[in-house]
Amino acid sequence: MSAYDPHEIEPRWEKAWEDARLFVADERSDKPPFYALHMFPYPSGDLHMGHVEAFSLADAVARYQRLQGREVMNPIGWDSFGLPAENAAISRGADPEAWTYANIETHAATMRRMGFAWDWSRRLHTSDPEYYKWTQWLFIQLYEAGWAYRAQADVNWCPNDQTVLANEQVIDGRCERCDTVVTKKSLTQWFLKITDFADRLLSDMDQLTGTWPERVLTLQRNWIGRSEGAEVTFTVGDEEVVVYTTRPDTLYGATFFVVAPEHPSAREWAARGGVADEFDAFLRRVQARTDVDRQAADASKDGLFLGVHAVNPVNGEQLPVYAADYVLMGYGTGAIMCVPGHDQRDLDFARQYDLPVRIVIRPEGDDLPDPRTMSVAAAGDGLVVNSGAYDGLGWREAKQRITDDLADRGLGRHAVNYRLRDWLISRQRYWGAPIPIIHCAACGEVAVPVDDLPVRLPDANEIDFSHSGEAPLATAEAFVHAACPSCGGAARRDTDTMDTFVDSSWYYLRYCSPHRDDVAFSADAVARWMPVDQYTGGIEHAILHLLYSRFFTKALHDLGHVDFVEPFTRLKSQGQVIMDGAAMSKSRGNLVEPRGIIDEYGADTLRATMLFAGPIEDDVDWADVSTTGMFKFLSRLTRLTDEHVASPAGPAAEAAADEDLRRATHRTIRDVTADFDAFKYNTALAKLMALTNEVSAAIRERGQGGDGPQHALEVIAIMLSPVAPHVAEEIWNRLGHHGFVAEQRWPEYDDSLLVEHTLEVPVQVDGRVRDTISITAGASQDDVVALAQQSDNVRRHLADRETVKLIWVPDRLLNLVTRPA
RNA sequence: GCUCCGGUGGCGGAACAGGCAGACGCGCAGGUCUCAAAAACCUGUACCUACGGGUGUGAGGGUUCGAGUCCCUCCCGGAGCACCA
């Protein structure tokens, strides 16, 4: 039987670590602190393969930093509020709280079997009153600063989950959780003013360049969607109407004017224009369409002439005013000037409603397009034409000048717009943190005083979950009725709960001092640990969670609670674990359970397999990876250790062989260290395997014993320990050590031992390898050429040819360039 | 449509900063051990070959003594955004 029995080894070391409280971060250590954070899990069922990969990465980072001499904080917690608990409650009559905490225990048990070096003493759950008390406190801080407000708006509504959704939670017009087509609903809801931070969310990304994946930064940049242009004032009758445009240089090309159907003036203008009934019908038609419908491929535009005209401030022209569904109320001012010659959407609309087209930019090098027949708008660069005094200017210059001139007349100004909208955080759900606001008929909105926090969730048995379409908390009478904190009169609590992304936007601060019941986080602890040194997690949170957390940090900074503006100094995103090319799921029948793999091969094999599968940021297809390969490696390594230990110092090793192994060991230290620094665990493992093969050859073929193999195996044990920690402890122990390998120092290499004395270098003739020759390191070009010319094969290829050039890359390669003699 | 990634053996993937393409592993083939099998171990494994060599990193061009790597054009795949004025 194999010497490697993970089922005996793993529990033994897990207990030893725990007994020694090895991974509890010490607040008073004088080692440099290192905050290793992974995105905490949502507890649905047991851990899945995606968790295993994410945590294997996170733990490798933390254990590596510990070996590098840092005092590491590697905490664990659960993002434990959320919809699935409630859905389970509705469909199976379970108690959301019981369901959630049972799942957490299942998670925790599997995590312990995986041997993750969590600091369990900092464990937190966002659904604990001790936690959400401070989530509510944070909400109040934002509210008092004017960054949380209630407004009526057309919001995204998921008819299946019976709740509103943030823009970020709507994917292709569908609910990100259940894929139901999202509809619009006009509701009064709570928003957080993330748009106030749009410019800083963008500009502070400079601090993250190089330490965050470029892809994540790009996603955030796109999401924020900054554009520069101008606001220009048109008039309709005696009413001023402001439009936003990125192309004020095309103002002279405007031939009509469009407002969003929901524009506040639209109905009044329609009435004035004598088309009120048509407008009402139009509005109903537009609102019946979902976003999915509106964004469908055909992109046909629905519009209605309102019977009134808008006056263009640059030339006094009268432009017909339309309401159309391709203009959105939520962006800019909900009104646009339309330049069909230079905007594709406007051109499409003009063709559909037979409106005139005018060219005001002459495209560089091209003829003027024919405005009567063109079907592709002229979007490129060029010189301004048909624009009065501005003719002949470059479009960039015209943009500047026209805007400046309008500003002088009080009819315009330079303006910046963002795609980003305020964050809608109200949810009509039970299992979340109640919004700590009381509505009083006399006093209006009143924040719950800090001393009264937390606003506790009522028990689930007080809730009528069958009451769909309304906030579940509204059905708990005892919860709803409250005294107004301001006047003491009878009042009602807000019955919405907060989006769970609010909970997860600050948990990294709570980890610093998770047991404090007088503050959300202690200033000292935050000063010690924050910002996070290394954050790891899935790319799926590239926008939502990371953007919200950055926003919270900036808000807390402005309120004086923290002295930094970015929470996560470095970020690494791992790919997803899939099976046969598709996401794993029970319904697809392609689910692989971590427990099954642990039962068969042990946790180390599972962890190492995940990290060996390929670059960590790439997806892993479980169908392509081999647990048996990794199990064989760990078995072979263990067996080799035993063979080494059992053999006496061995027959006197040949000096040369000993030197080879020593050089291989030092080269491996150098290369694996670089790989760990770059998160390249797949190649790090490959190099540890290669060194293991070298040790094997040294012992078995050369009969080498003693220091060389001992040192190589010690190095392997330490460098393997972040990835396969149990077997690394076992090997370390069998090599005769008593302390934990987890507490050793990462090995260092000696440059002088890397030098090879004899090298094999290729000799090329005209770029083709014709032989390899053996040279001494540092040999001169002349010596090498002389050696090369002794090679039969090289000589044959030089016959009848004249050498015209020599390329000698010292110690690497010789190339003889020839031509026919 | 726009933006950003990527394309290397049967498979996952290696290749510093332009210098011997295919590390490491899987799979496969052959062998040792065995009554046999499993396990373990050993050897081989890009393709073609008249055994000299030739061809190969999606396709085609270019730069260079030399290109998987740099430049241009194109094809394919993936991701994100998408009536954002």
Image: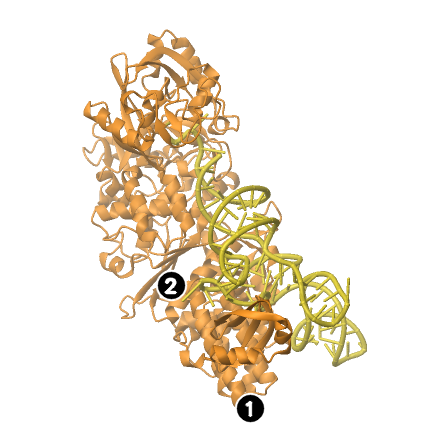
Answer left or right for B9 relative to A235. Answer: right
- Tag 1 near tag 2, CB within 8 Å: no
1 or 2: tag closer to the N-terminus: 2
Q: Nearer the viewer, mark 1 or mark 2?
A: 1
Q: Residue A119 carries which label?
A: 2
SS state under label 2? strand
What is the spatial separation of the Cα atoms under label 1 and label 2, in whole angstroms? 43 Å
Q: Is there any visible trace of residue A133 in the rendered image?
A: no
Residue located at (29% from left, 39% from top): A436
> In the figure, is residue A410 to the left or right of A167?
left
Which residue does the numbered mark 1 point to in the structure image?
A650
Chain for numbered disc 2: A
Three-letter code, disc 2:
Asp
Give above or below for B68 relative to A276: below
Q: At x 45% / y 68%, what residue is drawn?
A: A722
Placement of the C terminus of chain A among the 4 image quadrants = bottom right
The coloring applied to the image is: by chain
Residue A662 at x, y percent in the picture: 48, 82
Output the letter for the chain in orange.
A
